[in-house]
Image: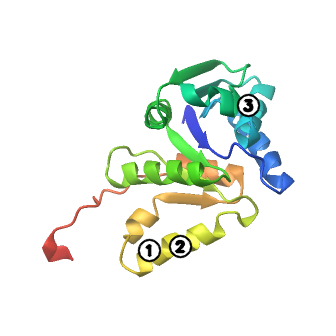
Amino acid sequence: MKSITVFCGSSFGTDKIYEEQAFLLGQTLAKQNIQLVYGGSETGLMGTVANGALSEKGKVVGVLPQFLQTKEIAHKNLTELIIVETMHERKTKMNELCDGVIVLPGGYGTLEELFEMITWAQLGLHKKPIGILNIDGFYDDLIKLVQTMVDKGFLKQVNRDMLLISDTIDDLLEKMRNYQAPTVGKWISKEEV
C-alpha cells in the first residue's frame, strides 16, 4: 500500500485518545512511506492525522470541496490540496488516490464515507481494503449492527468480513496488507435465495 485515505471527524470528540491515535496514525503512515489522503481540513481529527504525518515528513494530500473551504478551514501545510466542487467528487477523488481506507471516529459524514466505500467494494467497483480503527470501542455498537444485518439476512457474512476491524494501528495495517477481496459477487439469482 502506497497511499491510504483516512476518513474521520472534523471535531476532536470528547476523549483525548481519539486525537492521540489520529496523530499516531499519521506518524505511522509517514514512517512506513505511505501517503495520507484525507479531507483537506486543519480542524478536528482531520487536521490531527495530517499533522501527525507532516511531523514525520510524510506526503499528505487533502481533497476539499470549494464550499467547505471556509467551514472546515483548509490545511495550509499539505503536500498538495485538491479543490473539488461536490462532496461526491471529493469521495471519488479520494478513492482514485488510495490503495486502502481507514476510518477513525467521526459523525454522520464519516459514516457516510465508510458505507459508500464498503458498498462500492461489495459491488465490485474496487478491491481495496477498508479498515475501522476502533479506538477505545468507539465503533462497537456499529460493529454489532453490521453483524445484526448478517443475522437478519440483509448482508452476507463474506461481505461483512470485507470490513477489517482492529483497535491497534499496526494490527489494522497488517490486516489491510493481507486483505484479499472476496470472489463472490453481491448479486445472487432467485434460485440462491
Going by the picture, which residue comes out furthest to the bottom? 152
Q: Do the residues labelled 2 and 1 touch (CB within 8 Å)?
A: yes
Which type of secondary structure does the marked residue at label 2 adopt? helix
Q: SS of the residue at dot 3?
A: loop
Distance in Å between CA atoms under marks 3 and 2: 31 Å
Residue 27, can we see it? Answer: no
Type of the residue with mark 1: Met
Residue 42's tag is: 3
Amino acid beneath label 3:
Glu
Amino acid under disc 2: Leu
> Image height check: is 95 above or below 111?
above
Locate residue 121 relative to residue 55 in the image: left or right: left
Question: Residue 179, percent across and down?
Answer: 48, 51
At x 54%, y 46%, the residue is 177
Quarter of the picture containing the C terminus is bottom left
Decide: is 115 above or below 80.
below
In the displayed orientation, state which residue is furthest to the right: 16
